[in-house]
Amino acid sequence: PRLAYHARASLREFVGKQWLTYLLIEPTISWRLRIRHSDLIFDGKKQFRASVIFGNLKPGPTQVLFSRRLVWGRFVYICALRLDNGELLIVVSGDSPSTAISDYGKRWGIETLLGMFKTRGFCLESTHFTNSQRLSKLLALMSLALCWAIKMGEWLHQHQPVKVKKHGRLAKSIFPYGDEADNHLVELATAGNAQIIVTKNVNDFKRSQLLFPQIKILKPEQVI
């Protein structure tokens, strides 16, 4: 089925006049593009770095420039937000500048998910899968495993709270906290009469305090 989308968001690696021209060719495509703080903005009279224009912006409020400005030789709307870490988030768009920051922010959830699937979690890229059917099955298994790890992490956090650092954030995220709960997973697999546990952390399970010979510990590529 065709999926509806509100706007497309791009990383800062997608930069330059040609890329911006391509986006502006088709006015029906809404897009939100993050630019670098060193990129130049021209208002028709003077040209300044983005970091200079938004230099006085404090964390919290969003600032939207009242008219379109030239970036990479094309007229666009520009808005900015200073993040809690002091970094500037500057977004250009072809329309709806008042919602551009919030629209762009939605991609962070997607980026976090990809990080969990890849180097910060299940190491998807290490499988080197090229067959679309096998990859589809693996993604389905990983989605279930991700939900399980998050739910387990939330449950563990309620009973054994993760330490909160001075800056107010958790010492570790809920996802790896739940993903490390190997003993709990073995207990549940045993209670549910499961025959196989599928995981990339085979060695961790072999070192687990709970061992049940009737349960096989296999890697995803062994069952797909």
Image: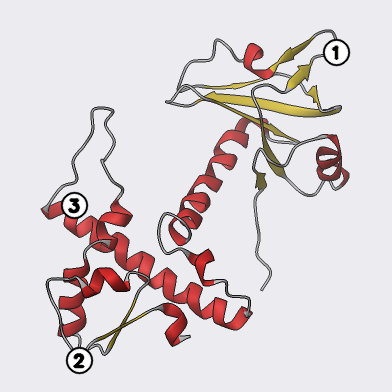
Q: Residue 143 in the image: state x and y as whole percent.
A: 43, 69
The amino acid type, in three-letter code, at marker 1 is Gly
Identify the secondary structure beneath mark 3. Answer: helix
Q: Amino acid at mark 3?
A: His
User: Of marks 2 and 1, which one's residue comes earlier in the chain?
Assistant: 1
Which residue bears the numbered disc 1? 44
Whether 151 is drawn above or below 120: the answer is below
Q: Nearer the viewer, residue 220 or 52?
A: 220
Q: Is residue 126 above or below residue 131?
A: above
- Determine the CA span between mark 2 and mark 1: 74 Å
Query: Sequence-wise, which precedes: disc 3 or disc 1?
Result: 1
Q: Which residue is mark 2?
A: 214
- The earlier-in-sequence mark between 2 and 3 is 3
Q: Position of residue 72 (x, y in %)?
A: 82, 28
Residue behind mark 3:
157
Residue ID at (86%, 40%) = 18
